[in-house]
Image: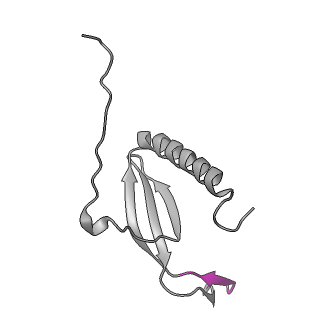
Amino acid sequence: MTDQPLEHRVEISVPEDAEVGVYAGFASVWRTRESFVLDFATEVRPPEVTRDPDSGAQFVHVPARVVARVRIPPGQVWELMKALEQNLSAYERETGGRGDGGA
């Protein structure tokens, strides 16, 4: 027998009620000492110009709601970044672009 560690094969199953996923127009990332938190959100109403009550400055208010919050341990962040980079590179090779109309 060898001292080589065994290969890990993770089998992921998605609950039926989550198979279609949810749409998120943007994500916010923040952290605590124990985890990184990814909040995926979508706009709930059209943006509107409003005024800050303290400064009087105008700004565009974008009402949004978190549709999914995912907490991951710090050690998993590198794996997520690698997976995103690999998939983004493959997407760009297949489509020839960014997919958002940008350059």
Q: Is residue 60 magenta?
A: yes
* View extreme (top): residue: 1
Q: Which residues are magenta?
A: 56-62
Counting from the top left corner in percent of width and height, residue 12 is at: 30, 49
- Quadrant showing the N terminus: top left
Q: Nearer the viewer, residue 35 or 85?
A: 85
Viewer-proximal residue among 54 and 102: 102
Q: Is residue 62 above or below residue 90?
A: below
Identify the residue at horizontal 38%, vertical 63% (top origin).
69
Left/right of residue 5 with respect to residue 50 in the rendered view: left
| Picture coordinates of residue 95, whole percent (x, y) | 64, 58
Check if residue 58 falls in the magenta segment.
yes
Image point (33%, 16%), residue name = 4
- Residue 45 screen position, x and y as percent: 51, 87
Identify the residue shown where x is 46% and y is 41%: 79
Rendered location of residue 23, percent (x, y): 45, 71
Q: Quadrant of the C terminus?
A: bottom right
Q: On screen, 43 above or below 12? A: below
Q: Is residue 51 left or right of residue 16?
A: right
Tell me how the rendering is colored.
one colour
* Rendered residue at 68%/87% (across/down): 56
Numbered marks: total: 0
Q: Is residue 12 above or below residue 64?
A: above
Q: Quadrant of residue 62?
A: bottom right
Report which quarter residue 86 is drawn in. top right
Taking 46 as reference, is 85 above or below it? above
